[in-house]
Amino acid sequence: PNLGIGWIPPLWKQYIQPNVPQWLGNYSFFLVFFLLFPWLMGPMEGDDHKDVEVPKSWRKVLQFLPETVRVPQSVKAERCRFLESANCASVCVNTCKVPSQGWLTADFGMPLHIQPNYDDFSCRWRFGVEAPPLEEDEAVMVPCFTNCPSQFKGTKDALSMRQKLRAEKEAVLGSESHLVVCLSVIVFAITACSYYFWGLLPAWEADAKLGWTKTTTLTVNWSCTLCEALGLCLAGPAADYLEPGHLMAVEGLLALTGVFVAALLPSAAELVLILLFVNFVKGNPKGYMPLAMFGVLLSPSP
């Protein structure tokens, strides 16, 4: 705007670009850079050519015209002076590539993807092509140049940072897997111990002093399953209001205490009540822990 040409971007964006084909818009930008920017980027050439059909009405009048013409859609600096002089991928990306992609897109509505080649110092400006997110751009994910004089060489470039983040993410995923295994063992320890009475049923039926009958066994089997389901529905939602670690500790303590007390009771009726209580408490961790394990797996990494 300070050069007196601030009227050009809105003119192009509002009136010209909407009324010309994409290939012509790209070719227009090619001409601008090809003719006006060699002082900065060095000699240039056309690239990404598109075959455009010449209108038949034109060929009828001018019979020497070909059926199609190849129109460049990109401009390529054979050896970018800016990149070669800077000799740094970070300078190229942060002072040329990203700002240029930004102002061309914002001011002219022209998508642009700049692709520098750090091996031969060439650079391709692809008009009409959306640039990928910066963290996924190949121009960023490169190591520092071998002759970089900076004391931070190899420590702050994007490639090293991405490799570091990837290693940290893999470590977090590994620790999460260990956590899932530990939670599974805890659930198994709390729930499996409450099934011990199944193996004792024949002995309880044979104990005349206990007063345990086959009818008692049948009643205990279905009522324990019912209590476990009730615990899943009624006590399970407690995990939404209480600290998970504290809840698991209380439930584990109650279940194990119930199993211990059941071994000391002399009456079948008292034993049945304890077993029902243990299975009710057991229903909570059985319902809560699968959700907790899925939560660990699906939660975003820190």
Image: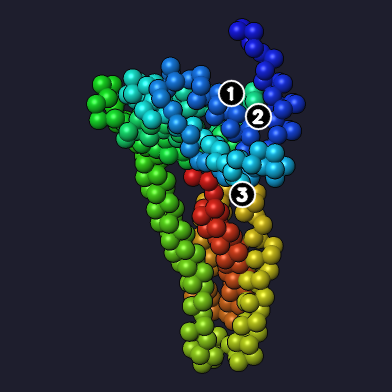
Q: Nearer the viewer, residue 205 or 118?
A: 118
Amino acid under label 3?
Leu
Disc nearer the start of the sequence (2/3): 2
Residue in the image at 50% along x and 25% along y: 34
Residue in the image at 61% along x and 46% along y: 67
Q: Residue 177 location, x and y as percent?
A: 43, 57
Disc nearer the start of the sequence (1/2): 1
Residue in the image at 50% along x and 64% along y: 187
Q: CA distance from mark 1 to mark 3?
A: 53 Å
Q: Secondary structure at mark 3?
A: loop
Residue 215 shows up from this direction: yes
Mark sitting on residue 242: 3
Residue in the image at 56% along x and 62% along y: 290
Q: Residue 288 location, x and y as percent?
A: 59, 60
Disc nearer the start of the sequence (1/3): 1
Quadrant position of the N terminus in the picture: top right
- Residue 151 is drawn in which quadrant? top left
Q: Are marks 1 and 3 in contact (CB under 8 Å)?
A: no
Q: Are marks 2 and 3 in contact (CB under 8 Å)?
A: no
- Residue 294 is drawn in which quadrant? bottom right
In the figure, is residue 196 to the left or right of 56? Answer: left
Q: CA distance from mark 2 to mark 3?
A: 54 Å
> Which residue is disc 1 drawn over?
103
